[in-house]
Image (cartoon, coloured by chain):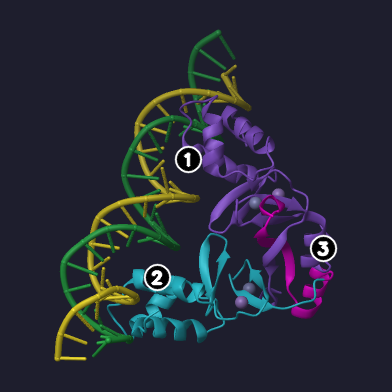
Chain colours: A cyan, B purple, C green, D yellow
DNA sequence: AAATTAAACAGTAATAGTTCCTATTATTGG
DNA sequence: CCAATAATAGGAACTATTACTGTTTAATTT
């Protein structure tokens, strides 16, 4: 992967926030340095940064958000303000612990384990 | 909510499978009984069935799938064949237990807890 | 049973997020 | 410096979903 000014800026923007930004938000930020960058460039580079392991892509309902934090961690999603908050836990008694530690009322738990099923051994 | 033939069929289709079907797949199924049903009708009714608590909507990456199983349960997503498989577990030592019980190699765990954060008490 | 009312409909246009295409520009190894 | 080609800007295309509108249908009232 060859160096590109745009990709470097995009990476910096993702690394500058804990807000799990969308492509659009990142686009707006980078535009202040490179006014005529195109949204396609943002998406292309986000995908590359994802594939190279610099960032990860998480889906918030149907929209993609980007996360510089590559540690194994989970997210609390507030369905009032939309915030996505990092958390890390030993997996025991999730709801109660989250209520106690984060003062976060869990209404819905979504767990997806991604991997390979036994059809492909 | 007034009775509708279309909604009844849509509900039956969702209840007839464990595959967590997409709107499009449901549309195709229902078309065999009601050839000129429109996709908008499928989406509208799926949303109503969801709001009335007959089915739930789950997001598989960026696309919506529908699930008749209203019990608290989780999903295994195979990233080779795309299958979404139900599972239910006490939340302890997830990866190892899943590997042992389901012969499913977990590459990535996604957990989202949806609720309300402490800003809204 | 006919008339009335409004929910649900089919068909289609619009929207939003994302990817694709192409001619041009920028990076880099030699 | 130059040639090779990766990356870009700008815009078209695509996909899943929602919104709009005139018509049909289910339910309620005469
Ligand atoms: Mn995170
Ligand atoms: Mn399920
Ligand atoms: Zn909040
Ligand atoms: Zn599989």
Q: Nearer the N terminus, badge 1 or badge 3?
A: 1
Residue situated in front as seen by the camera: B77 or A9: B77
Residue denoted by label 1? B40
- A84 left or right of A21 in image: right
Whether residue A85 is situated above or below residue A112 in the rendered picture? below
**Quadrant of the picture in which ligand 1 is shown:** bottom right
Whether residue D22 is situated above or below residue B82 in the rendered picture? above
At 45% from the left and 83% from the top, the residue drawn is A11
Residue denoted by label 2? A44
Res B72 → quadrant:
bottom right
At 64% from the left and 69% from the top, the residue drawn is A77
Res C10 → quadrant:
top left
Q: Secondary structure at mark 2?
A: helix
Rendered-image quadrant of the N terminus of chain A: bottom left
Instruction: Identify the disc placed on residue B97.
Output: 3
Residue A55 is covered by the magenta coloring = no
Residue situated in front as seen by the camera: B25 or A80: B25
Residue interval drawn in magenta:
A92-121
Distance from the alpha carbon under mark 2 to that under mark 1: 32 Å
Residue A102 is covered by the magenta coloring = yes
Distance from the alpha carbon under mark 1 to that under mark 3: 41 Å
């Amino acid at each position: 992967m060859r160096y590109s000014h745009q990709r470097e800026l995009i990476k910096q923007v993702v690394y500058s926030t804990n807000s799990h930004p969308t492509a659009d938000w990142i686009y707006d930020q980078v535009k202040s340095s490179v006014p005529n960058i195109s949204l396609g460039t943002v998406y292309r580079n986000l995908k590359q940064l994802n594939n190279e392991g610099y960032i990860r892509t998480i889906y918030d309902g149907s929209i993609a958000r980007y996360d510089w934090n590559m540690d194994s961690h989970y997210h609390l999603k507030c369905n009032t303000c939309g915030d996505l908050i990092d958390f890390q836990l030993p997996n025991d008694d999730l709801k109660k612990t989250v209520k106690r530690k984060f003062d976060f009322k869990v209404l819905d738990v979504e767990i997806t384990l991604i991997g390979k099923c036994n059809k492909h051994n």
